[in-house]
Image (spheres, helix red, strand yellow):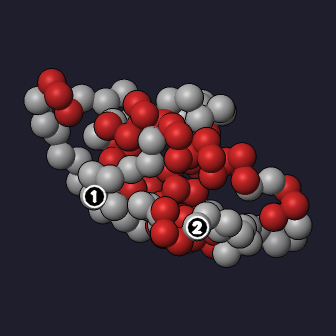
């Protein structure tokens, strides 16, 4: 009988602790999610199966950044885009989780993108 090998991701396990009140988050799980996501190219691979229908002249964020932010929001329990503005300023979701600097999509941008992407784009 064959035995399946366990996936053992190799990533930086060091933890930096900063007790500055403005940088406290309860969503530190994003850091582990990011490592698995980047290691196995999960959201990047998923983006290749979706169509970006946004006008190029109105794009502030890359399609991949917005998809990654939305996937992380869903994993955190935000099923309907309402908390995108919170995630936009959350330190764990920000520079450390998405690796795209301080500019993350707000509720309006995420909701527009979410409405345009349906199952027809996936299949």
Q: Position of residue 69 (x, y in %)?
A: 50, 50
| Residue assigned mark 2 | 55
Residue under the point 50% across and 30% down:
83
Label annotation for residue 44: none
Query: Could you say which is closer to the camera, residue 120 or residue 5?
Result: 120
State left or right for residue 82 relative to residue 19.
right
> Quarter of the image containing the N terminus?
bottom right
Task: Name the residue at 20% across, 33% down.
Answer: 23
Left/right of residue 33 with respect to residue 101 in the rendered view: right
Is residue 46 among what the camera can see? no
Q: Are marks 1 and 2 in contact (CB under 8 Å)?
A: no
Q: Quadrant of residue 101?
A: bottom left
The answer to which of marks 1 and 2 sits earlier in the sequence is 2
Which residue sits at x=42%, y=61%?
A: 60
- Mark yes or no: residue 77 visible: yes
Label 2 element class: loop
Mark 1 vs mark 2: in front:
2
Which of these two is toward me, 73 or 115?
115
Please, what secondary structure does the residue beneath circle 1 have? Answer: loop
Q: Which residue is mark 1?
A: 101
Is 108 positioned to the left or the right of 118 in the image? left
Residue 26 in the image: above or below residue 117: above
Quarter of the figure with the C terminus = bottom right
Question: Looking at the rendering, which quadrant does residue 111 occupy?
Answer: top right
Camera-nearest residue between 13 and 61: 61
Residue 92 x/y as whole percent: 33, 42
Image position of 41 with respect to 65: above or below: below
Vertical placement of residue 109 versus 50, above or below: above
* Rendered location of residue 94, percent (x, y): 33, 47
Label 2 CA crowd tier, 10 Å (few <14, some 14–19, many 20+): few
Relative to residue 81, is residue 50 drawn left or right? right
**Residue at the spot x=53%, y=40% of the render?**
108
């Amino acid at each position: 009988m064959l035995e399946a090998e366990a996936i053992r991701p190799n990533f930086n396990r060091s933890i930096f602790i900063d007790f500055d009140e403005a940088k406290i988050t309860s969503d530190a799980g994003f850091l582990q999610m990011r490592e698995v996501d980047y290691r196995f190219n999960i959201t990047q691979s998923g983006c290749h199966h979706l169509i970006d229908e946004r006008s190029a002249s109105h794009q502030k964020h890359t399609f991949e950044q917005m998809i990654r932010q939305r996937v992380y929001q869903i994993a955190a329990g935000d099923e309907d885009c309402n908390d995108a503005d919170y995630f936009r300023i959350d330190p764990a979701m920000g520079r450390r989780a998405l690796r795209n600097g301080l500019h993350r999509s707000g509720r309006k941008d995420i909701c527009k993108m979410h409405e345009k992407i349906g199952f027809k784009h996936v299949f």
